[in-house]
Amino acid sequence: MHHAVVNGLSIAYQRAGDGPPLVLLHGFSLDSRSWRPQIELLTSQFTILAWDAPGAGRSQDPPPTYAIGDWADALAGVLDAAGIQRAHVLGLSWGGLLAQECYRRYPSRVASLILAGTYAGWTGSLTAGVAEQRLNGALANASLRGDQFVKSYLPGMFGDAPSDDVQTEVGAIMADFHPIGFRLMATALARADTRALLQTIDVPTLLVWGDADKRSPLGVAEAMRDAIPGARLEVLAGAGHLSNLERPTEFNAIVQRFCRSLSRW
């Protein structure tokens, strides 16, 4: 685990492998450990950087005014510290919203986008009413004990038949959630509407979705694919929200094929 100090915050990140840089951005109740199968299996092809966002994992909690643009700035600082100028950026769920914001603020640093089980913000992909309902639930759940938090959120992360091992693995990560970071990330997701941004994306973009995703249904992916010029959608049958953990072999193969297909950065 490495640490970088960016704008006064200590930020933890994992770095491994050799090859084109691939940045992994986790979801709002998780941290870099949720990318274990990618860190273990893709390092022969890529230089992997997986961070703990401020407010998650081993990183410091941000101030209460933190917004999605602040996380994007923090990520740029971590990339500077790691000596990475340009990368493929893979974001899952909340991490996919962050990937979009990174493209908005730092387009020259994004070689491609891989958006998995994400949203154009909850407002942009669901409806304002659903976004408000989810946010109110998240703000209330942020005060739960770790085991209670896991019981509330874990069932919605998978398809209908996840393995016991992957449920145990994700539950252990979720139990370590940061209440402050979780509240701020949920607020960012609820308020965001990136539909106008999607139409301006001009780097190669891949969408990876499980067709059993309970949190971000496949219709969200189809709308995002249609909005992003030239975007492609790959669907993992039977997989839920955390398709990278539920179907790691297929997920990794999709990522490898996509990145290898890009002859120029």
Image: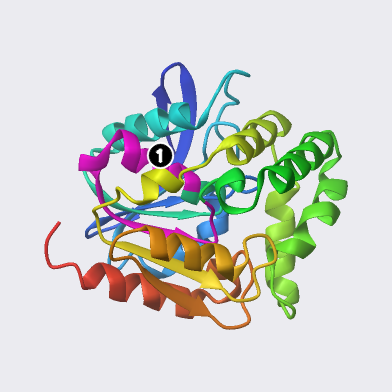
Residue 227 occupies quadrant: bottom left
State the residue in front, 171 or 243: 243
Please identify the residue farthest to the bottom as the structure is shown. Answer: 237
Residue 56 horizontal/vertical position (percent)? 60, 38
Q: Is residue 151 left or right of residue 235?
A: right
Q: Residue at x 44, y 29 (%)?
A: 69
Q: Residue at x 71, y 50 (%)?
A: 174
Tell me: residue 33, above or below residue 166. Answer: above
Look at mark 1 in the image and give the residue it sits on: 101
Q: Is residue 196 left or right of residue 260?
A: right
Tell me: residue 262, above or below residue 94. Answer: below
Residue 78 horizontal/vertical position (percent)? 36, 34
Residue 110 horizontal/vertical position (percent)? 26, 47
Type of amino acid at the residue the image marks with label 1: Glu
Residue 232 horizontal/vertical position (percent)? 35, 71
Residue 262 occupies quadrant: bottom left
Q: Residue at x 45, y 16 (%)?
A: 8
Q: Please state the total of marks drawn on the protein image.
A: 1
Answer whether residue 185 is visible to the viewer in this image: yes
Tell me: residue 108, above or below residue 156. Answer: above
Q: Is residue 29 left or right of residue 14?
A: right
Q: Residue at x 30, y 32 (%)?
A: 81
Query: SS class of the residue under badge 1?
Result: helix
Tell me: residue 10, above or below residue 87. Answer: above
Magenta residue check for 114: yes
Q: Give the extent of the magenta segment.
A: 97-119
Give the quadrant of the C terminus.
bottom left
